[in-house]
Image: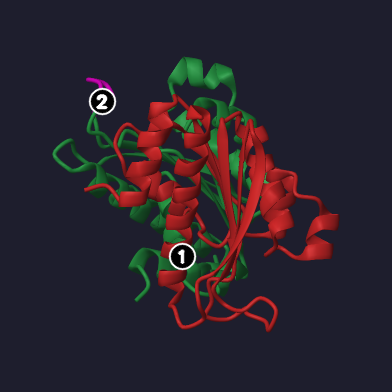
Chain colours: A red, B green
Amino acid sequence: MAHEAAGAAIASLRRYKLTLATAESCTGGLVAKLVTDVAGSSEVFSGGVVSYSNGVKMKLLGVSEKTLAAHGAVSEETAREMALGARDATGADIAVSTTGIAGPSGGTAEKPVGTVCFGVASKFGVRTFTKHFGEELSRKEIRNAAADFALELVAGECERYGD
Amino acid sequence: MAHEAAGAAIASLRRYKLTLATAESCTGGLVAKLVTDVAGSSEVFSGGVVSYSNGVKMKLLGVSEKTLAAHGAVSEETAREMALGARDATGADIAVSTTGIAGPSGGTAEKPVGTVCFGVASKFGVRTFTKHFGEELSRKEIRNAAADFALELVAGECERYGD
């Protein structure tokens, strides 16, 4: 059986004949994996970038060094540039990005483990979000929750095409 | 507990202080997901590209249109260019690629469901492989088997640095 959020995102993409791209840091390919678990997803999924290092964020997604230095990799500013960069690089209609701290280490007072920033870009522009999934969650739980939220953002962005 | 093949690949990368990049078509992010399931994988994993469409294969990995037209997306020639392109784009020491037919549809007499081509690129050059995982396997089983084999290729390539 398909993953629920992935199934809903794919259904929304199909409904409006849209294509998706992903730009993943903390989820590390999980969003793309969940989408491509579904047979026939190639009709709506262009592909994406797993930008685990800052170098890949800059080189493949066009995230600026200035943004990374000023706001850090885990920031809505970086998430915004990742989503815009993925959409531009792939030509997909919608791009979604994730960048956060899946833990167990890497957290700070300002950005504790479980902090994840998201971006979703489409012809309507780009929106960003920050979620705090909670330090008490495991790395696996944080990554799963982040992937679910990213897929919900995709479905929500698709629905704007029907308004 | 970490996935066995991912754990072994990460251990080998650490042993020789190498970094990894992925270029995934049929596995669709699964290899990157398995690597990044492991806490601390950012030390050895640069990132990668999920090149589900031919457009992404060309734009982000530099696969040539001529290669795709002459040999198809599922070919050792395409796998070779994907691995070389991912290594070049990310600056990682080793890049591994997957391109195949995970099914259930998309198979042909020449390239049945379960056919997966792989490439692994390093300072030693690039090697390519074709595996036939068997039409009787499910999409999930084929993807898992392909990810395992890709991770085994990574571990094997690392060991060449110790020779």
Between marks 1 and 2 in the image, the one whose residue lies nearer the viewer: 1
Are the residues under badges 1 and 2 in a single subunit? Answer: no
Q: Residue B15 in the image: x percent, y percent?
A: 55, 74
Chain for disc number 1 = A
Q: Is residue A28 left or right of residue B144?
A: right
Q: CA distance from mark 1 to mark 2?
A: 33 Å
CB within 8 Å, label 1 to label 2: no
Q: Residue at x 32, y 33 (%)?
A: B101
Residue B107 marker: 2
Residue nearer the viewer, B161 or B91: B91
Residue B80 against residue B36 in the figure, above or below: above
Label 1, residues with CA under 10 Å away: few <14, some 14-19, many ≥20: many
Tell me where residue A99 sits by quadrant: bottom right
Q: Secondary structure at mark 2?
A: loop
Vertical relation: B28 (above or below) B65: below
What's the residue at 55%, 31% (across, down)?
A: B57
Q: Which residues are magenta?
A: B107-112
Look at mark 1 in the image and give the residue it sits on.
A143
Identity of the residue drawn at 34% across and 56% down: B148
Residue B44 seen: no
Q: Label 2 is found on which chain of the structure?
A: B
What amino acid type is highlighted by mark number 2? Answer: Gly
